[in-house]
Image (spheres, rainbow, N blue to C red):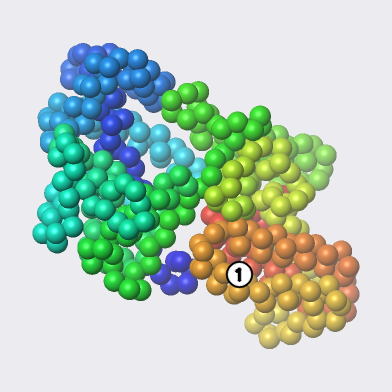
Amino acid sequence: LEYVGADVSRVNHVGDWGTQFGMLIQYLKEEYPDFTDDVPNITDLTAFYKNAKMRFDESPEFKKVSQLNVVKLQAGDEECRKIWQVLCDVSRKEFEKVYNRLDIKVTECGESFYNDKIAPVIGEFDKAGILTSEEGGAKCVWVDGYPQPLMLQKSDGGYGYDSTDMAAIKYRIDKLGATQCVYITDFTQGDHFQMVFKAARKIGWVEGDSHRLDHIGFGTVQGEDGKRFKTRSGDTVRLVDLLDEAVSRMEASLNERIAEGKAGITKDQVHETACAMGYGAVKYFDLRRNPTSNYIFSYDRMLDTKGNTAIYLLYAHARLESIISRAEADHGVNVDELIKGGQAIVLGHKSERNLALHLEIFADCIEETLKDLYPYHICDFVYNLSIAASDFVTQCKVLGTDEMQSRVLLCRATAITMRQCFQLLGIRHVMRI
């Protein structure tokens, strides 16, 4: 979207305001009663959450107090807010570890941000005459096509996902001026967001084609055994550890290439190159399929130098750059000077024409991606482009031929297009491997 000129706000709608925080607040109060004077060093959030969840599931009393903590937190209780801030700060530090590795820049705007905006939204629905009071006093909004309503306020006075998401979409449309909102969550929340979109239309925030509202659901990441990766309620494999393991394996592979005399990088460049390739491999493995489908997380497959992987693509790109560098070093052909001089590209061989045709459909790929917002279109394009490039450099000798200038330019055009695809996918490119 940004590539075609849209002003994009990348918002991380963190879950910092729900039942889980009432549970965590109560657990911290019980386990660290003197937390106000001695702030605990909670570095293993996974273990902390797991222990709190166990207590929540096993103790009805703990569960009830936890639920009341949520109401107190949302009402501004000083003690709950203080504990909540400690937990948010710890979480944020862990998030940053992942963001830094993946070059992610987002604005955190979680559920808590919308807390003071919920009551006015409920009032607006009430004034419009489309708010109903259900059994127990819960305030709800019904939309066509669904057997249950959106609950804007619970019977105990608390707010849930429905409340926050209605306040959020109102804020994004009215205050941010968004004309398109893209929600990316677990695919099981698809119905929930369709209800939110319908409610926004029902009250008149969205009319006709004035706004585009999209939900992109992602499937389940599975282990090698085909079972779902454990989440917060069980044994968790942290994303930061998965990323670091990918880098570690790439470092071993690159050091092996250096030892064999096959590498175009030095020992000092191994870590930086391994980070680009390892992180890129994990990203690409996730992005190259329909996001709603489940897939098995496999280091061996994602780090494979053959097939539809980021590793293969990065090697293909480095090969093209190597040819361009050798053209100048060995033959005095500078591709930038060729471009300045207006040197034409001549497509005489069928593999040259095939590669050029692949380059021509880049714009079509972007248009297709904008329709459904699925990155796998870009992955498919750059993979097929790489295959065409590999066929070209195999079928057509580039260096030391009468066609060298034209073919070096074709290599440059392909490398530039590949780098643009890498950028769109959030993958760092490397010039040499």
Residue 219 located left or right of residue 417: left
Question: Can residue 57 be seen from the camera position used here?
Answer: yes
- Percent position of residue 94, x then y: 40, 34
Q: Residue at x 87, y 64 (%)?
A: 394
Q: Residue at x 81, y 45 (%)?
A: 262
- Percent position of residue 237, x then y: 53, 29
- Residue nearest the viewer, comparing 260 with 199: 199
Does residue 167 sit above or below 59 in this rendering? Answer: below
Does residue 384 sit above or below 269 in this rendering? Answer: below
User: Element type at marker 1?
Assistant: helix
Kindly indicate the quadrant of the structure image that contains residue 175.
bottom left
Kindly indicate the quadrant of the structure image that contains residue 331.
bottom right
- Percent position of residue 231, x then y: 47, 30
Does residue 222 sit above or below 354 in this rendering? Answer: above
- Residue nearest the viewer, comparing 94 with 133: 133
Crowding near the residue tagged with mark 1, few <14, some 14–19, many ≥20 C-alpha atoms within 10 Å: some
- Residue nearest the viewer, comparing 350 with 200: 200
Kindly indicate the quadrant of the structure image that contains residue 21.
top left
Question: Can residue 267 be seen from the camera position used here?
Answer: no
**How many labels, in total?**
1
Residue 386 located left or right of residue 78: right
Amino acid type, callout 1: Cys
- Residue nearest the viewer, comparing 8 with 165: 165
Residue 298 located left or right of residue 73: right
- Percent position of residue 275, x then y: 59, 43
Residue, disc 1: 365
Q: Residue at x 34, y 54 (%)?
A: 195
Does residue 24 sit above or below 207 in this rendering? Answer: above
